[in-house]
Image (cartoon, helix red, strand yellow):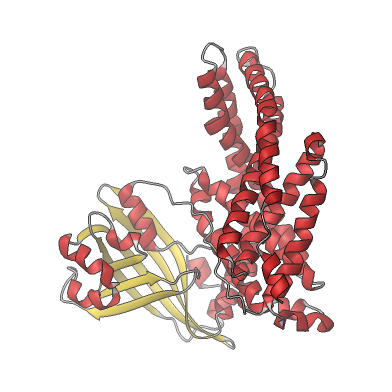
């Protein structure tokens, strides 16, 4: 931590040597975690002889902004009456019925310094200490950046220069979130992306910003679970977030040549590739292997195959954790966040294409969705006789269609039609994905080799999936018919315009 305190961006721009405090905090909630389940936290912090109660709330769809309200209290015990004005009224009856209890404590030594840059002022807090919940504890070693005035781009400028100075990992996971997970003795949650909300009248520039912020939020939310490794959904959601980001960047190519898109997309692809093996082995060990072993209980060798797969899974997770801890990953994430915050694509787009950013996003969406839908239909011609290679191409086109739909369908007023189309599109992608999963399984089995103890089990898995691929064909054809029969949600809008 001292090494970062001496970083040039700190040493050259700090107002003074800063202040040092010893902060003791107790975090409270009901036994049913009413506040946490509703995106709220309540703590009382002691600094010297002063006690301050704080209510914090997440700002929906924005990972770096939070509401925060403080009040002085008499001790480390909370004063609920002072907190109630900042808590939704619908929760008041729950809080009346359930007393608050101490969930965990934070004992932090903080060195805070004010940094002045041309674009803004940021408080940089060097925090070291420990979170404690019952018999469990967790160390804290973090640098917290809080914008005091000016542009939020200042946050990213300082973060990037700190990342250049030494090993850091960007995180939006609060002490509150870590403490509650510590108390519950569970790994970080891995969330699915939130559904986008876009006003039909929004300009394309604002739509891009909303889409990219959603992708960035999903990335940042998925990181803790992926780094922790205990919840396989973490790596899965991080890979989904990276695919969504790449799709969003590809979407922006439709405006014109953007110089930074290729670099950002390349970094997202690099990180996703280093995560792919971990996800493949997760699916094999946790889903494919136990399902087929249970169905083929008379076949021997599944235990030996599982042990061999566990070794490969561990190797894959080491590779994933190495990538996540790499400075390249930190620089990519911070650079991406700064580019989104400053809407860097405005500087990248050619002057003759700049006007496209001010056009209604709904017109852009009609063109893009229509083009991709036509591509899916073209890939699916003579569907019943498509060979495996062509089904794979159709799967990729369908996956892109699904991401574009998630981004752009909220622009259309006919929500019922959009939901129906999305459901049928998702069903088609999942059916096509089953074939891809079989190909991945075959590749994993080849990599394991035919050990005598596991060869029969490996053959059973291959045979089981070959049989399943035959059985899925009628279902896949039915799903394709349902998809092609669905009315496209943008057609009515197009006729109205």
The residue closer to the viewer here, 112 or 217, is 217
Q: Quadrant of the C terminus?
A: bottom right
Point 64% across, 12% down: residue: 452
Q: Position of residue 431 (x, y in %)?
A: 65, 39
For residue 78, which quarter of the picture? bottom left
Q: Position of residue 9 (x, y in %)?
A: 58, 77
The residue closer to the viewer here, 305 or 419, is 419
Q: Is residue 104 above or below residue 207?
A: above
Q: Is residue 469 above or below residue 381?
A: above
Point 25% across, 78% down: residue: 85
Q: Position of residue 83 (x, y in %)?
A: 24, 74
Camera sees residue 207? yes
Point 70% across, 59% down: residue: 247
Camera sees residue 168? no
For residue 28, which quarter of the picture? bottom left
The residue closer to the viewer here, 26 or 22, is 26
Give the total number of marks visible in the rendering: 0
For residue 451, which quarter of the picture? top right
């Amino acid at each position: 931590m001292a090494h970062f305190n001496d970083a040039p961006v700190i040493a050259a721009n700090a107002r003074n040597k800063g202040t040092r405090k010893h902060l003791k905090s107790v975090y409270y909630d009901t036994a049913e975690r009413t506040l946490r389940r509703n995106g709220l936290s309540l703590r009382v912090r002691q600094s010297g002889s002063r006690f301050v109660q704080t209510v914090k709330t997440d700002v929906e769809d924005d990972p770096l902004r939070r509401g925060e309200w403080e009040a002085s209290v008499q001790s480390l015990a909370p004063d609920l009456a002072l907190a109630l004005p900042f808590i939704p009224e619908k929760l008041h009856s729950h809080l009346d019925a359930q007393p608050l209890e101490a969930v965990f404590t934070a004992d932090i030594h903080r060195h805070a310094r004010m940094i002045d840059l041309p674009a803004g002022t940021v408080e940089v807090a060097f925090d070291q200490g420990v979170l404690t919940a019952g018999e469990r504890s967790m160390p804290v070693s973090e640098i917290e950046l809080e914008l005091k005035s000016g542009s939020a781009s200042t946050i990213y400028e300082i973060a990037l220069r700190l990342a250049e100075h030494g090993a850091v990992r960007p995180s939006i996971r609060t002490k509150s979130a870590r403490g509650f997970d510590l108390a519950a003795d569970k790994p970080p949650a891995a969330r699915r992306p939130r559904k986008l909300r876009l006003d039909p009248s929004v300009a394309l520039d604002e739509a891009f910003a909303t889409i990219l912020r959603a992708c960035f939020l999903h990335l940042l939310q998925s990181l803790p679970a992926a780094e922790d490794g205990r919840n396989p959904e973490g790596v899965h959601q991080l890979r989904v977030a990276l695919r969504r980001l790449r799709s969003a960047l590809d979407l922006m190519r439709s405006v014109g040549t953007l110089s930074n898109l290729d670099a950002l997309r390349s970094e997202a692809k690099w990180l996703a590739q280093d995560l792919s093996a971990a996800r493949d082995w997760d699916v094999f060990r946790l889903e494919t292997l136990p399902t087929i072993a249970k169905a083929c209980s008379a076949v021997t060798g599944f235990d030996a195959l599982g042990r061999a797969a566990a070794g490969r899974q561990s190797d894959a997770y080491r590779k994933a954790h190495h990538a996540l801890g790499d400075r390249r990953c930190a620089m990519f994430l911070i650079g991406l966040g700064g580019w989104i915050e400053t809407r860097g694509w405005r500087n990248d787009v050619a002057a003759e294409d700049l006007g496209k950013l001010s056009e209604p996003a709904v017109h852009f969406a009609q063109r893009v969705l229509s083009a991709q839908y036509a591509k899916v239909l073209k890939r699916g011609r003579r569907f019943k006789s498509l060979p495996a290679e062509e089904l794979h191409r159709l799967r990729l086109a369908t996956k892109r269609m699904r991401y574009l739909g998630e981004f752009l369908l909220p622009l259309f007023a006919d929500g019922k039609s959009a939901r129906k189309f999305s459901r049928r599109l998702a069903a088609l992608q999942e059916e096509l994905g089953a074939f891809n999963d079989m190909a991945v399984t075959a590749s994993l089995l080849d990599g394991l080799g035919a050990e005598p103890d596991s060869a029969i089990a490996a053959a059973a898995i291959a045979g089981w999936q070959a049989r399943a691929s035959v059985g899925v064909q009628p279902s896949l054809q039915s799903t394709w018919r349902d998809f092609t029969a669905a009315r496209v949600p943008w057609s009515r809008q197009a006729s109205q315009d």
